[in-house]
Image (cartoon, helix red, strand yellow):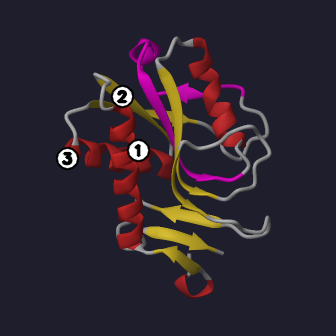
Amino acid sequence: MSQDVNSKILNQSKTLQKIKRIAYQIYENNFDESEIILAGIAGEGFVFAEMVRANLQEISPLNVSIAKIIIDKSADFQPEITIESDVDTFRNKAVIIFDDVLNTGKTLAFCLRPFLSIPLKKLRVAVLVDRNHPQYPIAADYVGYSLSTTLSEHVKVILSNEESLGVYLY
């Protein structure tokens, strides 16, 4: 990604600040839980979940587990969503699904499917950027940054590369 044709929305410092704030919000809303599970969508969503987990471990006594959700974000239909964790791990626990960007809500709607057949204590959604283009009845409980964009604009979140870490509009 060429830096000169993109507009940096959040630099590294601001992005890390948003992630830390989300960790504090999650702790405030789950301080009475014995364990919470952060389920990140493979790619930057999973990296986002790992970063929040690291922050939670610094600021709270919560037992925080992590799981990876594997999904094909480009597919119109999802025949199978894989969670790299035993389903019983989630039973009667507080679960938070993580994705980098909430655009239409389609990816997150697909990701809910495996969790609907498990008795959970609660299920929440965390996103770093909410683009405000809902086409599915999905809303994020934890949002780092709300950004109204046109449908032709794209938002790219980079968390897995420290040199480019940030949020970009192109």
Q: Residue at x 41, y 50 (%)?
A: 22
Magenta residues, start to end: 79-103
Give x and y (percent) for residue 56: 28, 43
Residue closest to the eye, 66 or 148: 148
Of callouts 3 and 1, which one flags the residue occurring earlier in the amino acid sequence? 1
Of the numbered discs 1 and 2, the one sitting upstream in the chain is 2
Q: CA distance from mark 3 to mark 2?
A: 15 Å
At mark 3, the secondary structure is: helix
Q: Quadrant of the N terminus?
A: bottom right
Amino acid, disc 2: Ile
Image disc number at residue 49:
1
145 in relation to 5, above or below = above
Assess disc 1: are there few (<14), some (14-19) or many (≥20) residues with their C-alpha within 10 Å of its C-alpha.
many
Residue occupying image coordinates x 54% and y 13%: 118
Residue that sits furthest to the bottom in the current view: 4
Q: Which residue is mark 3?
A: 58
Which kind of residue does numbered mark 1 sit on?
A: Ala
* Residue 143 at x, y percent in the picture: 52, 52
Residue 160: x and y in percent read 40, 59
Is 163 left, or right, of 62 in this rendering?
Answer: right
10 Å neighbourhood of mark 3: few (<14), some, or many (≥20)? few
Residue type pointed to by label 3: Glu
User: On the picture, is 130 further left or further right than 152?
Assistant: left
Point out which mark residue 36 bears: 2
How would you rate the neighbour count of disc 2 (Cα within 10 Å): few for under 14, some for 14-19, many for 20 or more?
A: many
Who's the residue at 32% across and 24% down the image? 33
Q: Position of residue 14 (x, y in %)?
A: 40, 70
* Label 1 secondary element: helix
